[in-house]
Amino acid sequence: MPIYVTECPQNVAEIKTTTLQDVVRILPDFLLEPLNVWITGKIVQFGRTDGNLIFTVEGKEPTPRIKHLFHTFVSDLGIQGTVDNQWKNQKFVALRLYDNGKLIIDKNTLQYTKIPSPTKEPAIVTCKEVLEKLPDTISWPITLYLTGGIVRCGWSVNDLDIITFERQDRTTLVELRNFFTNLFGWKTDVGFTIMTEREPVYLYKIYEQGKKCHQ
């Protein structure tokens, strides 16, 4: 139910704000596992947030123990923390906190105490990762092809490219672009024009009339 207020900002409830320094100060200097860990979201962009915290780790899905560990760390701040492995997600602004399990942010200055080591995996998106995320159906009854470097090479460090030969209005193209960008966690362009200067152009059909082509 909405709450109607007579003042802006509202004065009904106190909104808790957590700063980046609040978080860093409660983190342990070492983890039990040699993990690379980032923190993402508004707290990195603006130094503070009024929401819960998102940590991300490199590699496979974080174990329940790691998820519980970080939730326990931030519970002292009166907020919740989640952990995922979407560290390559282009949607997030991320700050590296741990390098091989060692905290590398000074708790007072928030400066790096060492240069983060290179990640174990290249910051690319692969064809396999993309195809695994495709739902069986989409809301738009059109035929779509995956194209660009992801089809040509099997991986991409740039935008993902999707094309349809059924001309769509700008609103639909924007909706498709936002849908696939959110789905893949990687900036995606959707259009209906082949760039001949990039020939040969490879097309891999992913949807026909809104239904997934490959199971």
Image (cartoon, rainbow, N blue to C red):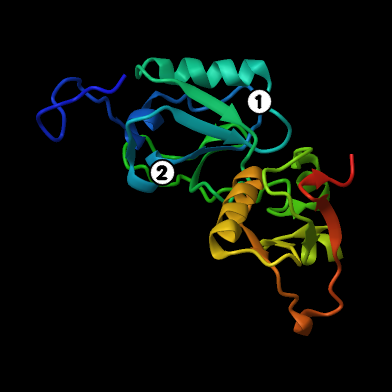
Task: Name the element at disc 1.
Answer: loop
- Say left or right for 132 vs 82: right
Q: Amino acid at mark 2?
A: Val
Residue 116 visible, this orientation: yes
Residues marked 1 and 2 touching at CB (< 8 Å): no
Above or below, 138 against 82 in this view is: below
Which is in the foreground here, disc 1 or disc 2? Answer: 2
Which residue does the numbered mark 2 point to in the structure image? 44
Instruction: Point out the tag, 1 or 2, that comes first from the N-terminus.
Output: 1
Place residue 183 in its image quadrant: top right
Task: Name the element at disc 2.
Answer: helix
Which quadrant would the N terminus be assigned to in this image? Answer: top left
Count of numbered labels shown in the rendering: 2
- Say left or right for 90 vs 119: left
Q: Say which residue appears at 71% left-offset and 54% top-offset.
A: 124
Which residue does the numbered mark 1 point to in the structure image? 33
